[in-house]
Amino acid sequence: MTRAFLPGLTVALGVLALGLLVAFTVGRYPVSLTELVDVLLARLTGRPSGAPAAVENVVLLVRGPRVIAAVMVGAALAVAGTAFQGLFRNPLVSPDILGASSGAALGAVLGIYFTLGVIGIEVLAFAGGLIAVAAVYVIGSLLQSRDPILVLVLTGVVVGALLGAGVGLVKYLADPYNQLPAMTFWLLGSLAATTVSDLVPLTVPIVLGTAVLVALRWRLNVMSLPEDEARALGVATGPLRIAIVTAATLVTSASVATSGIIGWVGLVVPHLARALVGPDFPRLIPTAAVLGGGYLLLIDTLARTAAPVEIPLGILTAVIGTPFLHLAAGRHAADLVVSTRS
Amino acid sequence: MTLAGRDLTIGYSDRVVGRGLNVALAQGEVLALLGPNGGGKTTLLKTLLGILNPRAGEVAIGGRSLAGISIRERARLIAYVPQVHVPTFAFTVESVVLMGRTAHGTLFSRPSANDRAVATRVLEQFGIPHLAARPYTMISGGERQLVLLARALAQEPQFVVLDEPTASLDFGNQGKVMREIRALAGAGHGILFTTHDPNHALRAADRAYLLREGERIAEGPVGAVLTRERLEDLYRAPVEKLTDTATGVSAFLPG
């Protein structure tokens, strides 16, 4: 049952490489492999490329930023989901369990309602995610329980529901001809509008948060044990939990602010990564990051090319993710039966 | 070195479970904690571990208050063996044992060569090196108990505190775990364990501590403390005592 790390990581890297190849070459304006290599090499070495200017534009300005954003958002959601599944000791948890997505959604629809422009909407969405999770954490801590994890999850559900009502209210009040479609589109998630200028505000929090989670990966094993055990093993669970939640929320909020709500990636990819390298977090976190990048890149390419119009990303990830969840949940149910028999 | 609780009031923020409790555990000694369900055994155990703060009184180790010792240093002094349970994730046995080395590294450090050597050594000590690569979720309950013991020993502690180490084990494994407990005490560890079976206390412990409704009923050498009368009083149920005339070894039967 033990799975080797390097072969598993190689598969994940293969998925990412395939994703990169397909994403750059396939689309309304096909780019051949030689043109792609030519443009990228020219970019790296600084010499002029032999490819037509249109090809260069498609690769560097149209698809480039979108590809980078897809890889970063996919990696971020996968790493955050992996960390949260460990922290909450539940493989069916996703990164929005503490309300990051609901908070970001309310921030974004408010930004659209007040016609704040792209930057304003992104800032509000990012802040909304952070504030929602901070509120959940503070309320959960005030409730003082012997099971802080359970209280956090319950508070997250309650706050998430409240924020959902807020989103509903703003949509109800919004102008149905201009604002409402924009809100609906944002809530379904898309990377279509990604430009080079989006990459900087996306990169900083994602790299920062992901780096923290990767650095803490050896402690995540212990954090996935019951609270008492983790403490008896010498881990100050309170401060470490705050660090993990902060890092995961940072990357989730940054992703959602850029791409809108893309569900299921943070839930499904950790499972796929676990199937490749096993449950050990030190291996799982880097594998989930690579695999998540490749996974979302492939889905985004599908969203862009499968139909004459763009399919919203959130819809595709759900269509692909839900049957998967069903399978995973079924398997866990089987595990539970086995364990009660032993 | 002694692990001692003085005038402890134990409990949670909303509820006091026990008052005026004094416990002392020396190295090389095995102390069994007995008492009916809900009598405060687990609460006392968690207080002595430092997982739960005493409501009043003090837990001290080697004369130093536990409250003044960092959680990391505590884990190098006292190890905890919880009741066997199935974890959420199917970690390998080696990973589980390596988690016992957590307090010997820093926040970001990976297990060192020494950590891995310690993990291998403790697995060999309990006769289960062949399980190292197996998922912890796929081994038997008895094997899991040994793995948790190995993890505790990987902490290289002075004291080991076990919560019902023989519960849910078959007869043979109960005996095996009790032999291992004796061996750990022989190697100089101070051992505290809770149990529902007075015979396990007779078999493995030097002293017994009887706890009912948060009150100490009796404490002392197992032979002196564990009498039929006292057990009937402790559990408020009839008890029968059997003695092997050849060896003089005694055992109790409930009902």
Image: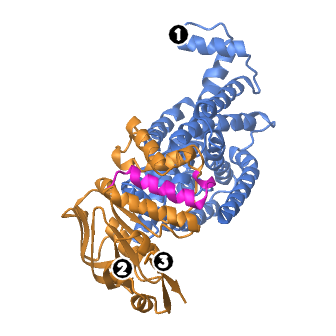
Chain colours: A blue, B orange
Residue A15 lies, in percent from the top left, at 67, 31
Q: Amino acid at mark 1?
A: Gly
On the image, numbered disc 1 is attached to which residue?
A: A46
Whether residue B138 appears in magenta in the rendering, the answer is yes
Of the two numbered discs 3 and 2 in the rendering, the one whose residue sits closer to the viewer? 2
Give the class, few, some or many, for how many residues have Cα within 10 Å of label 2's Cα (few <14, many ≥20): some
The reply to whether residue B230 is visible in this rendering is yes
Q: Report the predominant secondary structure element of the magenta stretch.
A: helix
Give the class, few, some or many, for how many residues have Cα within 10 Å of label 3's Cα (few <14, many ≥20): some
Q: Which mark is residue B223?
A: 2
Q: Amino acid at mark 2?
A: Gly
Report how far apart the C-alphas of labels 3 and 2 lie in the structure.
15 Å
Residue A128 lies, in percent from the top left, at 49, 54
A22 or A339, which lies in front? A339
Tell me the quarter of the picture where residue B52 sits: bottom left
In the picture, the quarter occupied by the C terminus of chain B is bottom right
